[in-house]
Image (cartoon, rainbow, N blue to C red):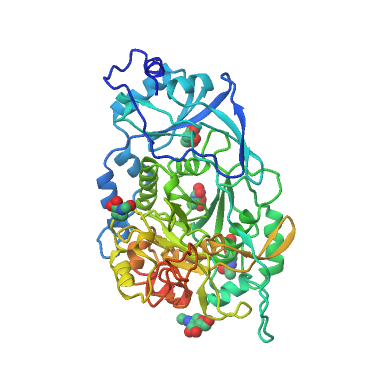
Amino acid sequence: MGLGACLLGLLALFTAVKCSYSPEPDQQRTLPRGWVTLGRVDPEEELSLTFALKQQNLGRLSELVQAVSDPSSPQYGKYLTLEDVAELVRPTPLTLHTVQKWLLAAGARDCHSVTTQDFLTCWLTVRQAELLLPGAEFHRYVGGPEETHVVRSPHPYQLPEALAPHVDFVGGLHRFPQISSLRQRPVPQEAGTVGLHLGVTPSVIRQRYNLTAQDVGSGTTNNSQACAQFLEQYFHNSDLAEFMRLFGSKFAHQASVARVVGKQGRGRAGIEASLDVEYLMSAGANISTWVYSSPGRHEAQEPFLQWLLLLSNESALPHVHTVSYGDDEDSLSSTYIQRVNTELMKAAARGLTLLFASGDTGAGCWSVSGRHKFRPSFPASSPYVTTVGGTSFQNPFLVTNEIVDYITCSLERGFSADCRDEAVAQFLKSSPHLPPSSYFNASGRAYPDVAALSDGYWVVSNSVPIPWVSGTSASTPVFGGILSLINEQRILNGRPPLGFLNPRLYQQHGAGLFDVIHGCHESCLNEEVEGQGFCSGPGWDPVTGWGTPNFPALLKTLLNP
Ligand SMILES: *[C@@H]1O[C@H](CO)[C@@H](O)[C@H](O)[C@H]1NC(C)=O
Ligand SMILES: *[C@@H]1O[C@H](CO)[C@@H](O)[C@H](O)[C@H]1NC(C)=O
Ligand SMILES: *[C@@H]1O[C@H](CO)[C@@H](O)[C@H](O)[C@H]1NC(C)=O
Ligand SMILES: *[C@@H]1O[C@H](CO)[C@@H](O)[C@H](O)[C@H]1NC(C)=O
Ligand SMILES: *[C@@H]1O[C@H](CO)[C@@H](O)[C@H](O)[C@H]1NC(C)=O
C-alpha cells in the first residue's frame, strides 16, 4: 500500500525502515455468492474491531493439551482452569503496552479485553479505522437468507511493521458470515412395509445407539452441554416444547434451554438452530443445555471469532460444545487458521470437548488451474477438535446398519502430525481404491473422527414439524449429547469430564463405536476419479471416522480412568 497512508497511520510512534506489512496476505477477499455491496460506509460511523494479540508459551500449551488428553499420561484429566490458561498465554507487558498505546493514539475507545488478555475489541470511527489499518476501506454489504448487513473491507489491510511481534491479525475486515448447508431431501421412494420408521426422530436415535430410558442426565451433577450457531437464526423454546411433545414422551428431558448466551431475537426460528437444540437435548437428554446464539452482532464482527472470545472470557463453561459451522480452508489466511488452532488448544487444555460438523459436501471440491481437488472445511480440519461425519440407514425406513451418507469428509492440508497418523497410514495402505493423490495431501490432518446418522431428521421449526432434514449439522449434536451422557456417568463416578477426545479415541482404535464399512463418498468426480471418492472400510476411514456410537459399549470404554 501507499507509503503516505502508512506514515499517517504511524505518526511518530514507530520508525521502521519498511513501515508496514500485511498480516493476512492469503486471506480470500472475493465477495461470497449471495452478497451485494451497498457502498462505502460513512467515515463518522462507528465500528467494533477485534485485535488478536500475540500470545506466549504456545509450545508449552501444546504439550499440556497432549498431557491432559492422553489417558496414558499421569496428567490425564488434570485440566487447566481459565486462569491457568491466562497465566500461560497472556501477552507480554510490552505487547499489551504497545498495542494499547497504538490504539489510544488512533482514537480507539471503549476497548474490552478477555480473561486471557489476548484479544481486544475496540470502537473506532470508520475514518480512524481506515487510518489505523492502511489499505482498509469499509463497505457495507447485505446478503444471506436473513438479509444480514455486514461491514467489511474489499481491500487488504496493513499494520505497522513495529506491531508484527505484537499482533496476529485484526478481525472484522474480510471474513463473511456463513450460510447453512442444511438440506431437506426428497422422501425416499422404496418404502417397505414392516417395522417402519418414517424418518429419524429421537426414539430412532435412542434405539439405534442403544440408549435406554435410564440413560439421561441425573439432575444431580453440574453437567452441561452447549450448541453454538453463527447464522442469523434463532430457536424458539415453544418449538422445543412442541418437538418434545411429539417425540420426547419416552425419555426424561429438560423443557427449556438453561441459558442463551448472545442475542436471542424475536425473528422466525431457523431450521438449523431448531435442529441443534432439539437433538442435543434428545441425545443428551435431561442435561442442562446452553445455546450460543449469533455472537458478534455488530456489523464489523465475525460471529465465530466472537464465540472464541466468549470462551476465553468465562471460567465456568459447559463441558461439551457442538458447532455446525465451517469455512473453506483455502479461503482463510494461515495466520487466522493458526490463531484459531491456538484458541481451540486453549479450550482443549481446559477439558472442553469441541465437536464440529465435517460439512455437507463430501470431501468438498474445487478446481485449481483446471484440476479438481478436495476442499477441506475449517475448523473441521483443525487437529484440536473432534469432527463428526454423517451416515444413513442402509434401509432408509428401518433401524438397520448404517452406511456412508453422501455428504461426509476428507484428508487435507492440516497443521500437525498427530495421533491420527497410524490410523490414516493404515487406511491409505489397505483401502482397495483411493482417489488420485493429487486430490488431497496425505500428510495432512484427516477427518472425520466419528460419525452419526445425518439423514432424514424430523425437526419442529416455527411450530411446524418438518421431515427429511439432512446434514452433518444433525449428526454433530447427536454425538455431542451422547458424550454428555458419558460425562454424566464420569462425574457421578468422581472422574473429570472427557475433554479433548481424539488422543483417547485413536489410542483405543474407536472402541465402543459401530464401525461403518459400506459406502463411498461421491463428490468431486471427474474422469480421473472413475466413479468414487474415499470408501469406508474396517477401522478408521476418511468417510465415517471410527464409526457411530454404541452407547453401552462406548460408556464402558470411556468411563475410566
Ligand atoms: C469479558 O468479561 C468482562 C467481565 O464480565 C467484561 O467486562 C468484558 O467486556 C468482556 N470482554 C469482551 C470482549 O466482551
Ligand atoms: C446395541 O444394539 C444393537 C442392535 O441395534 C445390538 O446388535 C447390539 O448387541 C447392542 N449392543 C449392546 C452393547 O447392547
Ligand atoms: C431429570 O432431571 C431432574 C432435575 O433436572 C431430576 O429431578 C430427575 O430425576 C431427572 N430424571 C431422571 C430420570 O433421572
Ligand atoms: C455449575 O454450577 C454453578 C453454581 O451452581 C453455576 O454458577 C455454573 O454456571 C454451573 N456451570 C455450568 C457449566 O453450568
Ligand atoms: C501437506 O501437509 C503437510 C503437513 O501438514 C504440510 O507440511 C505440507 O505443506 C502440505 N502440503 C501441501 C502441498 O499443502
Judged from this view, the residue extending furthest toward the right is: 463
Where residue 209 appears, as percent x and y from the top left, is 52, 75
Where residue 135 appears, as percent x and y from the top left, is 44, 25
The C terminus: image quadrant: bottom left
Where residue 435 appears, as percent x and y from the top left, is 39, 67
Classify 383 as above or below 47: below
Which is more toward the observer, 373 or 394?
Answer: 373
Classify 424 as above or below 331: below
Q: Residue at x 71, y 68 (%)?
A: 246
Which is more toward the observer, 32 or 479?
Answer: 32
Q: Residue at x 43, y 36 (%)?
A: 114
Count of labels shown?
A: 0
Can residue 415 be seen by looking at this rendering? no
Where residue 111 appears, as percent x and y from the top left, is 46, 26
- Whether residue 42 sits left or right of residue 83 in the image: it is right
Judged from this view, the residue extending furthest toward the bottom is: 194
Can residue 126 be seen by looking at this rendering? yes
- Whether residue 50 sits left or right of residue 11 in the image: it is right
Q: Residue at x 53, y 62 (%)?
A: 472
Which is more toward the observer, 23 or 452?
Answer: 23
Q: Residue at x 50, y 44 (%)?
A: 304
The N terminus: image quadrant: top left
- Whether residue 512 sits left or right of residue 184 in the image: it is left
- Whether residue 173 sits left or right of residue 202 in the image: it is left
